[in-house]
Amino acid sequence: MKSDPVHSSPTRPIRSFVLRQGRLSDAQARALKELSPEWGIPFSRNPIHFPDVFGNSEPVILEIGSGMGETTAQIARQDPQHNFLAIEVHGPGVGSLLRRIHEDHIPNIRLIQHDAVEVIEHMIVPNSLAGIHIYFPDPWPKKRHHKRRLIQAGFVTELTSRIQPGGYIHVATDWQDYAEHILAVLSSSPRLINSSSTFATRPAWRPQTKFEHRGLKLGHGVWDILFHKRADSIID
């Protein structure tokens, strides 16, 4: 998943990503053309009415940066009682997830191919989400690039306002420095409460990727951070 902010200059707005557009395969290009009308949601500056989009009133979980879609598809398949809205900017990933939805018959996913900051600002109303998943965002490991990291206080405030009381934000990263930064940022929000004393055990709903499994066998760490919105935090 790569979906991270670049701070603005006087002439450049803040974005939630750095565009690293890979080459589309023929199958991905076909999926973008043929399947987007069915499973994609065009960006607009109007709020989404989730029951209209999904055809039901099941709770909605937002995923920021769905990458190639393998994890998104697996979570949605195993949890049909939730709807999933994935945001991804990169064409190959969007095309890949559209193919998975179609071929595996996963009706509870919709995709938006756009900047997550703008989607959240314009399309997601306050107190409307059951949860938010952000898995393996770009760690921007060089210190001079840390300001580009997605998880910053201002963005967390926006995310928190869109979650229902009792809903959650779940982040996973394989960079310890970034994990500590994320933990500190979420801990500083007065409207969020940590589900653990520090880092969380990987929740059952987050499948372990092949890359992650290989890294763990080599001794690399993975850190899960799971916070809930306080039940008394209603007005935004």
Image (cartoon, grey):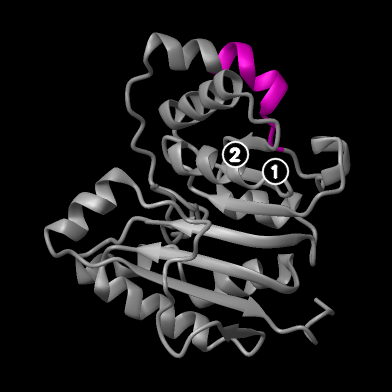
Image mark for residue 80: 1
| Residue type indicated by callout 1 | Pro
Image mark for residue 77: 2
Q: Main secondary structure of the magenta part?
A: helix
**Residues rendered magenta in the picture:** 32-43
| Residue type indicated by callout 2 | Arg
Between 166 and 10, which is closer to the camera in this rendering? 166
Farthest residue to the left: give it: 218
129 horizontally vs 179: left or right: right
Dot 1, how many residues are within 10 Å of its Cα: few (below 14), some (14-19), or many (20+)? some
Is residue 128 in the magenta section? no
Q: Position of residue 210 (x, y in %)?
A: 28, 44
151 horizontally vs 102: left or right: left
**Res. 136 visible in picture:** yes
Q: Secondary structure at mark 2?
A: helix
Q: Confirm or deny contact between disc 1 and disc 2 (CB under 8 A).
A: yes
Dot 2, how many residues are within 10 Å of its Cα: few (below 14), some (14-19), or many (20+)? some
Between 20 and 9, which is closer to the camera in this rendering? 20
Q: Residue at x 47, y 81 (%)?
A: 185
